[in-house]
Every structure is written in structure tokens, then in C-alpha cells.
Image (tube, rainbow, N blue to C red):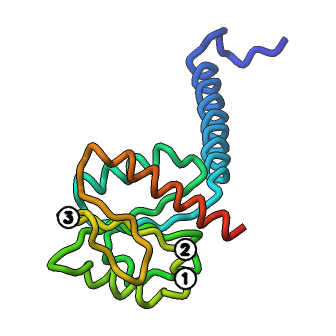
Amino acid sequence: MYNCGHKKGSPTVLLLVFITSFFLNSMYAQELVNTAKDKKTYKVFLSKQDSDFKNEVVEELKLNSDDINFKVTELSALKDLKIEEWDAIVILHSWEFLSPPRVVKRFIRANTSNKKKIVVLTTSSDGDAKMDEVDAITGESELVDAYEYAYIITERLNKVFARAN
């Protein structure tokens, strides 16, 4: 029997086993990540203003939408958005000074032919302000209602996806 000079359990052998095990584990973990990414059926662009309420709605959407890959951005990203690259667009904004934010107004008006892909939640102090051009979900920014609004948005998204199939 050939002896390479290493004793059983030597540090070199243990190091080799550790490196091999680490390498195989990393490959398997990456495969699981890739598989999980592939499970995401729909791509949704979600643009929002920053607030505790809107952030909570987004978290609820992510928790309850296993088949949706959300890209979450600030409203300013709407100006460069190519709507055809997305299965749906979700916009969460507040009504300010008797009007929606300018970027939202411009985006909606520029995409009226695709408005069936757009889901909007408009919050306001009285809870019913919205743009005429879009069938928006309206309400007040009550943190306790975030789950309910996420559910309503999910239902609207399901209708968007059903129309596309």
C-alpha cells in the first residue's frame, strides 16, 4: 500500500473534505435559488411613495404572492418605465394638493391604452380621491388596513394576469 506520508485524519485530508463539501453545498444552494427564481410566474413593477402604510402594503403583497416577482421603486422611476416589459404595474400614491403626483398623472395619461395592466392605490384624507382615467382603489392611510389593501391589490393583479392568459 502506498503511503503519501499523511496520517489518518490529517489536516490536509480534512481541509480537502471541507473544501469539497463547501463547493458542492454552494452549487446545490445556487441551484435552489435559481429554481426559486424560475417559479416566479409574473413580473410586476411596483412604484410607490415612501410611508409606513405603503411600505406595509408592499410587505404584505410580497408575503402573500409566491408567484410574483416584484420590482419596487420610488414614483420617479415611472418616467422611464417601458410598460410592455412588465405583466402588471402597481402604483401606490397619495393625493396631494387636490391632485396626484405629477409623475403618476403623466404616466397614467401616457399609458391609457394599457390601463388594464395598471393597478393604482390612491390614499387621501377623505379616502375617495382618484384620477378619472383609472379605476383606482381608494382609501385612507390607516396602517391597520394594510393587509386588506394588499388583498384587494392581489385580487386586481389576478384579474390582470387572467386577461393576459
Q: Position of residue 156 (x, y in %)?
A: 52, 61
Camera-side mark, 3 or 2: 3
Q: What secondary structure is found at the residue carrying circle 1?
A: helix
Q: Position of residue 135 (x, y in %)?
A: 44, 73
Q: What secondary structure is found at the residue carrying circle 2?
A: helix
Kindly identify which residue carries mark 3. Answer: 126
Question: Could you tell whether 145 is left or right of 124 in the image?
Answer: right
Between the residue at mark 1 and the residue at mark 3, the CA separation in whole angstroms equals 28 Å
Q: Are marks 2 and 1 in contact (CB under 8 Å)?
A: yes
Kindly identify which residue carries mark 1. Answer: 114
Are there few (<14), some (14-19), or many (20+) residues within 10 Å of tag 1?
few
- Which of the 4 image quarters holds residue 25? top right
Q: Quadrant of the N terminus?
A: top right
Marks 3 and 2, the one that precedes in the sequence: 2
Kindly identify which residue carries mark 2. Answer: 117
- Which of the 4 image quarters holds residue 147? top left
* Residue at (60, 63) in percent of width and height: 159
